[in-house]
Amino acid sequence: MKPIDLIKDDLGEEVWAECSSRTSSSGEIEPAVELSPFSTSKSYQIHGRIRQFDFPTLPHGSYCLYDANGRRAIRLTRVGKEIESVLKENWKVLAECDLVVLARLILKFYDDGIKATHSVLPDVDSLLSFSNYHVVNERELEKVQHKIGITSFTCNAEEFVIRAITLCGWMHDKRNLGVEHIRILRSGNVELDARKVLSKKIFKSVPKIRY
């Protein structure tokens, strides 16, 4: 079956009819490439009413995430941590994934929600080009640049560890630069070390929200 048909069956006809119109005006729902680290399945964002799903959108609405292929569609929730079953399924190929995309997907289920989400960066160059509207605090950057490094991984027979460089904060206001160590066990369980904060104000200014 097509992944979208499996998602439709899981949501039910009535919910699907409403959500599909909110998700795509054309009726074609494409995978969310920026949240799809695995080669055998893709992530899909399905949009709904305010507070209907896990992840809020502004100025109103919400969305949920599915990991789906031609055999099954798994709705990924913050409470259920279904992402761990997907990680277990893909344990042997985690090293082949785009680490930025993988860390971005995982952190969605372990962050502080709308109050503090993550933007995952591959390296310091991506920090400098994060946005034309963010002004880097040069003094802060000079102090911590040698500590930033790159988003990378280490692994052994029982554990796959991502060292992820992230900007963390409320929505677009992500001035907290730090390092997350995401530990993925062979069982799929995820453990996060305490965040290593490099700078609490890496940007002098950030853009204002425009609706």
Image (cartoon, rainbow, N blue to C red):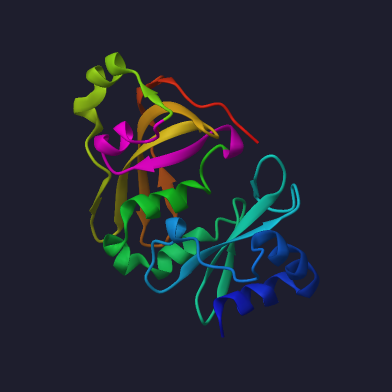
- Residue extending furthest toward the bottom: 1
> Which corner quadrant holds the N terminus?
bottom right
Q: In percent of the image, x 59 and y 30: which residue is there?
A: 209
Q: Is residue 162 left or right of residue 3?
A: left
Quick one: 184 or 15, which is closer to the camera?
15
Q: In percent of the image, x 55 and y 61: which residue is there?
A: 82
Residue 131 belongs to magenta span? yes
Residue 144, image x and y in percent?
A: 25, 22
Q: Is residue 137 left or right of residue 104?
A: left
Residue 20, image x and y in percent?
A: 69, 66
The magenta stretch is: 113-132
Q: Is residue 131 left or right of residue 11?
A: left
Quick one: 110 or 166, which is closer to the camera?
166
Quick one: 65 or 48, which is closer to the camera?
48
Q: Is residue 108 left or right of residue 97?
A: right
Quick one: 211 or 3, which is closer to the camera?
211
Q: In percent of the image, x 26 and y 39: which residue is there?
A: 123
Residue 4, image x and y in percent?
A: 60, 75
